[in-house]
C-alpha cells in the first residue's frame, strides 16, 4: 500500500496537504491501536477533530447488514447534535454509492469491505472542503474501513472468548472476571455474596434419548428463567456444557440457604413437562464470600469442591463448601496415591477365612479377603480403600490380581495335599457387569490350571439386581465354565424372588446383621429362617456369615443352615496357616 505522502505526491496540488496527511496518518495509527470497538468509534472522531479544527460536529454510525438502517454510536465536536435532513441525505448518498460524498461544508465517508457497508462517518465543518481535503478523506476512509473491520473482528473474538453462543450468557472466563471485578470494587466493605456452580445430572442421557435440540432447548429455557429469577446477580454464566454459574449478593446465611431451593424450582416448577425427568436433577455447589475465600481462584475452587461433594451425595442435591470436605478429599487423593504405590510395591495380600459345614464340622471352603499393609506396617481397612480404588479406576486391576492370586494359592494348596474345597472372591458391580469379565475369568483359569469348580464368585444382592439382563448373562456364562456362584449379604437388598429363582447361583449367604440377632431378636430369627427355607426350596446351599458363639450355631443347625463362617471358628488368616486349619477333624467340637 502507498503511504499518505505518496498519495499527496500523486495529488501534488496543495502546499498545506503534507501537514494534514501526517496528522491523518498518525490518526490512523492511533485508530489501529484501539482494540475495542467503542474506543475505535470515539478515537476516530477525536483524531479527526484534531486534524480538522474547523469541525463543529462529527458522528460515527454503524450500519445494519440486514436492512441498511444506521445507528449513531459516537458523537464529537463543539456542538454535537442530531443529524438534519440534508445531512441524512448526504449520508444516504454515500451509503448508496459506497464512496465518500461531499457538500460544501459536510462530508459522509462510507466505510466499505468489498461490497459490504461496515459503517459511516459524518463530518460538519465551518469551512468548505477543498480538493486536497477530499483526496485525503477518501484515502482516510479506505484505511479507516480496514481498521474498523479489524476492530469488529476483535469484538467478535472477544464475544466468543467471554460469551456462550447458545444462551448469550457469559462463559466461565466471563464469570470469573465478573467476580474478580466485584471483589475489587467491594474491597473495603466486603459485602457478602454467594458463588454457585451447578450441573444438570444426566443431561447427556437426555440428549441421547430426546435429541440434542431438546437438550439445547432445555439449556436456553433454563438460562432465561435463571435470568428472570436472579435479576440482581453479579454474574450469571454457562460455565460448561451442562453447567451454570451464578454469583449473587446476600445479606446473611439465611438468604444463601434459600438459593439452592430457588434453582431447584427452575427445574421442578417452571420448565415444560417434557423436561421433568426423574433423573434430570441439578447438582449444586455453593461457597460464601468472604467467609470461605477472598479471591476468585479460591472461591471457584471451593464451589468445585462443594459441587463434587453434591454429586456424590445420595440425599440432598446441594452442598455448601466446608473446609472438612476439602480435608476429606485431600485424604482420599493422598490415599489413592499411596494405593497406587502400594500396588507397585506388592503391599496387597489375601487372607482367607474358613467356611465350616454345620453337619460334619469340616472346612468346606475359604473366602479370600483383601488386605493392604502399608510400608509403615499399618493396615488400611478394605471399606476405606476399596471405594477409592473403584472411584479412581484401580478396582479393575485389583480385582484381576485378587482372582489370579486366589487361583494360584488354591493350586499351591492342592500341590501341598490340602483338600479340594473352593476359594471364594468378592466381585464389585462394575467389574462383574463388564463384557470382559467372563473372558478374564476364563483366561485366568487357563493360565493357572485351576479347575473352575474350585473358584467361587461372590456377588452381593445389590449387584444381581442391577442391569438384570447383563448380570444374568454373565452368571450363566460363568456357570457354563463350571465356576460356582454365591449371593452375598442376602436379605439386605430388594431382590425379586421370581428373578432369584432363575439365577444359576449355588449358595445364599445370610448377612451378618441378621445372624447377630438370631438368638435375641425374633425378627432376625424369622428372617434367617426364611432365607434358609428359601435356599432349600431353590436347591441352594445356605451359608451364615459372622457367626460368633455356640448359641448362634445351635440355632442355625436347627434351622437347617448348611455352612457358616465367623470368629467362633477362625478369623481370616494368611495362606500358610490354611493347611493346618484344613486338617482339623471337626470344628464344632471346639466351639465353647
Image (cartoon, rainbow, N blue to C red):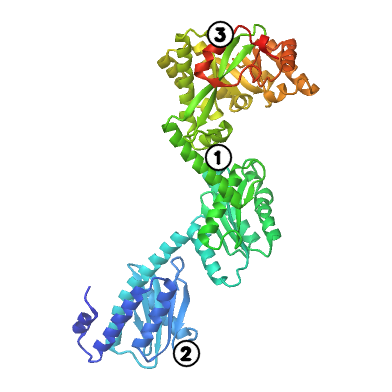
In the rendered image, the quadrant that contains the N terminus is: bottom left
| Above or below for 549 versus 74 | above
What whole-number distance in Å separates the C-alpha atoms at marks 3 and 1? Answer: 56 Å
| SS state under label 2 | loop
First in residue order: circle 3 vs circle 1: 1
**Contact check, label 3 and label 1, Cβ < 8 Å:** no
Q: Where is residue 578 in the image (x, y as percent from the top left)?
A: 53, 15
Quarter of image, res 119: bottom left
First in residue order: circle 3 vs circle 2: 2
As drawn, the label of residue 583 is 3
Residue at which label 1 appears: 205
- Residue reaching furthest bottom? 127
**In front here: 443 or 206?**
443
**In front here: 122 or 505?**
505
User: Label 1 crowding class (10 Å Cα cut-off): few <14, some 14-19, many 20+?
Assistant: some
In the rendered image, the quadrant that contains the C terminus is: top right
Q: Where is residue 320 in the image (x, y as percent from the top left)?
A: 63, 52
Query: Mark 1, mark 2: which one is toward the viewer?
Result: 1
What whole-number distance in Å separates the C-alpha atoms at marks 3 and 2? Answer: 110 Å
**Contact check, label 1 and label 2, Cβ < 8 Å:** no
Residue at which label 2 appears: 79
User: Label 2 crowding class (10 Å Cα cut-off): few <14, some 14-19, many 20+?
Assistant: few
| Above or below for 268 versus 150 | above
**In front here: 578 or 201?**
578
- Residue reaching furthest right? 522
Residue 572 visible in the displayed image: yes
Residue visible at 59% across and 10% down in the picture: 364
Q: Position of residue 118 (x, y in %)?
A: 39, 70
Amino acid at each position: 500500500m502507498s503511504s499518505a505522502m505518496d498519495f499527496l505526491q500523486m495529488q501534488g496540488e496543495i502546499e498545506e496537504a503534507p501537514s494534514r496527511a501526517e496528522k491523518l496518518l498518525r490518526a490512523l495509527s492511533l485508530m489501529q491501536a484501539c482494540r475495542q470497538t467503542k474506543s475505535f468509534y470515539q478515537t476516530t472522531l477525536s483524531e479527526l477533530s484534531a486534524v480538522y479544527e474547523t469541525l463543529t460536529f462529527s458522528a460515527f454510525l454503524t450500519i445494519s447488514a440486514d436492512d441498511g438502517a444506521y445507528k449513531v454510536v459516537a458523537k464529537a465536536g463543539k456542538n454535537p447534535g442530531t443529524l438534519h435532513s440534508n445531512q441524512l441525505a448526504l449520508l444516504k448518498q454515500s451509503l448508496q454509492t459506497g464512496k465518500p460524498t461531499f457538500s460544501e461544508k459536510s462530508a459522509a465517508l462510507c466505510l466499505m469491505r468489498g461490497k459490504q457497508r461496515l459503517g459511516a462517518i459524518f463530518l460538519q465543518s465551518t469551512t468548505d472542503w477543498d480538493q486536497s481535503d477530499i483526496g485525503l478523506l477518501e484515502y482516510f476512509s479506505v484505511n479507516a474501513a480496514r481498521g474498523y473491520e479489524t476492530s469488529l473482528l476483535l469484538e467478535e473474538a472477544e464475544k466468543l472468548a467471554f460469551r456462550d453462543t447458545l444462551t448469550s450468557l457469559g462463559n466461565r472466563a466471563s464469570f470469573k472476571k465478573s467476580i474478580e471485578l466485584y471483589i475489587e470494587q467491594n474491597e473495603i466493605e466486603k459485602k457478602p455474596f454467594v458463588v454457585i456452580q451447578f450441573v444438570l445430572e444426566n443431561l447427556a442421557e437426555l440428549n441421547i434419548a430426546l435429541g440434542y435440540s431438546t437438550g439445547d432447548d432445555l439449556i436456553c429455557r433454563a438460562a432465561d428463567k435463571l435470568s428472570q429469577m436472579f435479576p440482581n446477580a453479579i454474574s450469571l454464566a454457562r460455565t460448561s456444557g451442562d453447567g451454570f454459574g451464578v454469583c449473587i449478593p446476600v445479606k446473611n446465611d439465611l438468604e444463601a440457604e434459600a438459593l439452592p431451593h430457588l434453582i431447584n424450582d427452575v427445574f421442578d416448577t417452571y420448565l415444560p413437562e417434557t423436561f421433568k425427568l426423574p433423573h434430570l436433577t441439578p447438582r449444586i455447589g455453593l461457597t460464601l464470600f468472604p467467609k470461605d475465600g477472598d479471591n476468585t481462584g479460591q472461591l471457584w475452587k471451593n464451589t468445585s469442591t462443594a459441587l463434587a461433594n453434591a454429586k456424590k451425595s445420595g440425599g440432598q442435591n446441594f452442598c455448601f463448601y466446608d473446609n472438612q470436605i476439602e480435608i476429606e478429599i485431600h485424604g482420599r487423593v493422598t490415599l489413592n496415591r499411596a494405593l497406587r504405590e502400594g500396588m507397585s510395591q506388592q503391599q496387597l495380600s489375601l487372607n482367607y477365612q474358613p467356611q465350616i459345614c454345620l453337619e460334619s464340622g469340616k472346612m468346606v471352603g475359604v473366602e479370600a479377603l483383601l488386605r493392604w499393609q502399608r510400608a509403615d506396617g499399618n493396615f488400611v481397612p478394605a471399606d476405606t480403600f476399596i471405594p477409592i480404588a473403584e472411584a479412581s479406576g484401580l478396582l479393575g486391576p485389583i480385582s484381576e490380581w485378587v482372582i489370579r492370586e486366589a487361583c494360584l494359592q488354591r493350586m499351591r494348596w492342592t500341590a501341598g495335599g490340602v483338600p479340594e474345597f473352593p476359594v471364594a472372591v468378592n466381585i464389585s458391580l462394575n467389574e462383574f457387569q463388564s463384557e470382559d469379565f467372563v473372558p478374564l475369568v476364563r483366561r485366568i483359569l487357563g493360565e493357572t490350571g485351576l479347575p473352575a469348580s474350585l473358584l467361587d464368585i461372590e456377588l452381593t444382592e445389590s449387584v444381581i439386581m442391577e442391569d438384570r439382563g447383563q448380570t444374568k448373562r454373565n452368571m450363566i456364562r460363568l456357570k457354563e465354565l463350571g465356576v460356582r456362584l454365591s449371593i452375598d449379604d442376602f436379605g439386605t437388598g430388594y431382590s425379586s424372588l421370581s428373578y432369584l429363582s432363575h439365577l444359576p447361583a449355588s449358595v445364599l449367604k445370610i448377612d451378618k446383621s441378621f445372624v447377630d440377632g438370631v438368638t435375641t431378636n425374633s425378627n432376625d430369627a424369622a428372617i434367617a429362617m426364611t432365607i434358609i427355607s428359601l435356599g432349600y426350596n431353590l436347591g441352594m446351599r445356605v451359608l451364615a456369615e459372622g457367626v460368633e458363639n455356640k448359641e448362634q450355631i445351635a440355632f442355625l443347625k436347627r434351622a437347617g443352615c448348611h455352612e457358616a463362617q465367623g470368629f467362633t471358628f477362625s478369623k481370616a488368616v494368611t495362606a500358610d496357616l490354611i493347611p493346618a486349619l484344613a486338617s482339623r477333624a471337626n470344628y464344632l467340637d471346639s466351639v465353647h
